[in-house]
Image (spheres, rainbow, N blue to C red):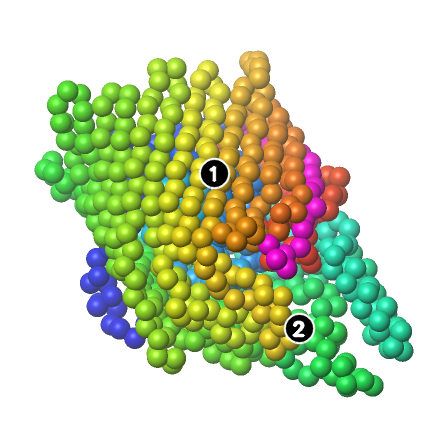
Amino acid sequence: MIRRPLATLLAGTALSCLPAAPLLAQEQDEGAVPHVHDPHDEEDVIVVTAGGLERLDMLAGTSVVTDAQLQRNMAGQVGEVLESLPGVSATGFAPGASRPVLRGFQGERVRVLVDGIGSIDASNTSADHAVTIDPLTAESIEVLRGPAVLLYGSSAIGGAVNVIDRRIPHRIPIDGLRFDGVVSGDTATDLREVGASLDVGLGRNFAWHVDGSFRETDDLEIAGFTLSDELRADLLADAAEEFEEGHEEEADELIEAANLSGIVPNSASETLSLGTGLTWFSGLNSIGVSVSYYDTDYGIPIAPGMGHAHGEEEEDHDEEEHEEEEGHDHGEEPVTIGLEQFRADLRGEFHLGEGFFHDLVTRWGYSDYTHTEFEGDEVGTVFDVEGVEGRVELIQSEQNLGGGTTLRGSLGGQFFYRDFVATGAEAFVPPNSTEQYALFTLQEVRAGPFEAEMGARWENTTQEADTIAVSRSFDTFSGALGLSYSFDSGIRAGVNFSRAERAPSAEELFADGPHIATSQYELGDPDLGTEAAWGVEGYVRASIGGADMRLAVYRNWFDNFIYLFDTGLEEDGLALTQYLQQDADWFGVEGEASVPLFSTGNGVLVGDVGGSYIRATLDDGSPVPRIPPLSLTGALEWQGEKLDLRSEVEWYDAQDRTAPNETATDGFAHVNLSANFRPFGDERLSVLLQADNIFDAEGRRHASYTKDFVPLAGRNFKVSVRTRF
């Protein structure tokens, strides 16, 4: 728990250089917030970008998922919602726990934000921990990639995901009232989902918001065998040994486990989310607060036949080796996680006049998080996280430098504090605290079609673990320079250069113990140094004749890259993994295009293509673990006044470029169909019918720790009804 008075914590002013600027109740300033028009909406959909993106456009790759695409991709975890975007995958540890993977980066190198502030949970510490954000409450989700994202914090070397949820109202509803509701179901998980939100204008100066959602699923239905071919072969070989030694019952159990198909046991989930908020508006000023509650219970799948002994002795067998053998404990209880978070947030924007600084923007969040890992009905390990994050930003007025050249920018600071306590026999990280202060600046110079953007960040991070008497302090410096040119034809080309530094996390420093949910013994290194990355990225973006295109090529060179290595050894019957450091090299290409093929008076046929390729290598020549393979997506979509029809193919190459003790992953393709019907020709009512993976193809996500026993869903039929008025 946080041991310092909250007032002391809030005294640390802070700023991440890309804040989420609130919308004003009145008409917004030109360029302050971009409008994205949906042809099916009667009014513009206002997308709140992470502040600074529209002012300082350093990001070569930014994707915004809204409305129809959100409804089509909706899932219980934000990683699953976004995984079909170019350059994005998901950890997919379990249906109830899946975090985004951006450009092959995951964990500490990807920040997950709520309206510009961190989720302040434990999802970054381990892949089995759920993200405490319900995508059903999202108005839009931004995927931010590229060098400038490092200004969200040094941990965002890989990128950031920003979820806009409207819990702090951004504006007073136009007609004084707005209601959104959704009901969904599917066949692969027997999904039952319902959610609703209400925004109410209270006079001319206040807006109130309330929302709630409930989601329940059964075990995931899959195509083919639950285990990968390699794990099945191992189990069948073990079964043959058991049979030769006269243990026919054990052999039969192993054969049954190897042949399990059609389902992922212990993968069900149940989630409840509630939130309310109030904002006061006065001219160009606003301040709002919100409180929310998130509660989820979900199963952690374990490889069938592999057991989960955690170093305990097994049932007595006739021979001594069976007493010590850890792989055949068939009496293990299922592992489940019960998680809840209480959260409070504040956002304010204050107009300072027409001087050098014209706006002050502040954003704060507080979280009280508890996460319990159960073995059957017994409590195994309890994680308690309490934290505060905040920032303050001063927005500069645009300065005319003469000759048609202008300067604009912002500066400020950020503060973060987290207190982490894990209790129980299998607490793999000692109690620890993290305290972080940062200063940043972000500037843009524009001269006609030329733009130059510059950003810099200093960050001080202190990690303390009192029970083992270890304290580490790190000063990191990061910077970025972007140059771009806009052509009259609608094409923009640019190059970004960056250097980012990241302090090791508490888990990377202090871990030393068995982790029940991941079946690993994790070992940190308190002597780890800072991780640094040089980066260069070239990009082209175009919007010509209704067609949109984005292509980015990037390269990163890491000094002292921190990674979790599977040693191939065992400790207490678990796979021994250890955090190590060495240099690494990253190369990637990603792109997407949307082209109108032909149109009639009733609609337009659009072709979409996208893809990404990543190659990451450690200094010793071995591949970085869990790097997604080459992927390509192609789709045709008919966009009509009342009906949209979409056919889509998602293709993933095999990944046989693997790290030591990492298994290869077969390639696969999923074919998906969807129809979205709007009987009134607008968003007052929409009915979405989907058929995903219609050929019931087996697929496994290489970025997942559990890919060898948690495949992707098989054939899935889904219906979703959404209303808005």
Q: CA distance from mark 1 to mark 2?
A: 39 Å
Relative image position of residue 514 (x, y in whole percent): 55, 74
Residue located at (82% from left, 65% from top): 237
Q: Amino acid at mark 2?
A: His
Residue in front for this viewpoint, 497 or 438: 497
Residue annotated with mark 1: 65
Residue 176 seen from this side: no
Residue 679 among those drawn in magenta: yes
Which label sits in the foreground, 1 or 2?
2
Label 2 residue SS: loop
Q: For numbered disc 1, what is the local secondary structure?
A: strand
Q: Earlier in the sequence, mark 1 or mark 2?
A: 1
* Residue at point 64%, 36% (across, down): 650
Rendering coords of residue 202 (x, y %): 29, 47
User: Within 10 angstroms of label 2, few (less than 14), some, or many (20 or more) residues?
Assistant: many
Q: Position of residue 418 (x, y in %)?
A: 35, 66
Image quadrant in which the C terminus is located = top left
Query: Magenta span: helix, strand or loop, mainly?
Result: loop
State the residue lying farthest toward the front: 620
Q: Nearer the viewer, residue 448 or 26?
A: 448
Please report the residue visible at 55 percent of the width from the left and 38 percent of the height from the top.
613
Report the amino acid beneath label 1.
Val
Q: Name the residue at 70% across, 41% down.
A: 668
Indicate the quadrant where residue 260 lies: bottom right
Q: Residue 515: image x %, image y %?
A: 55, 71
What residue would you read off at disc 2?
Answer: 308
User: Which residue range is magenta in the image?
Assistant: 659-683
Say above or below: 130 vs 394. below
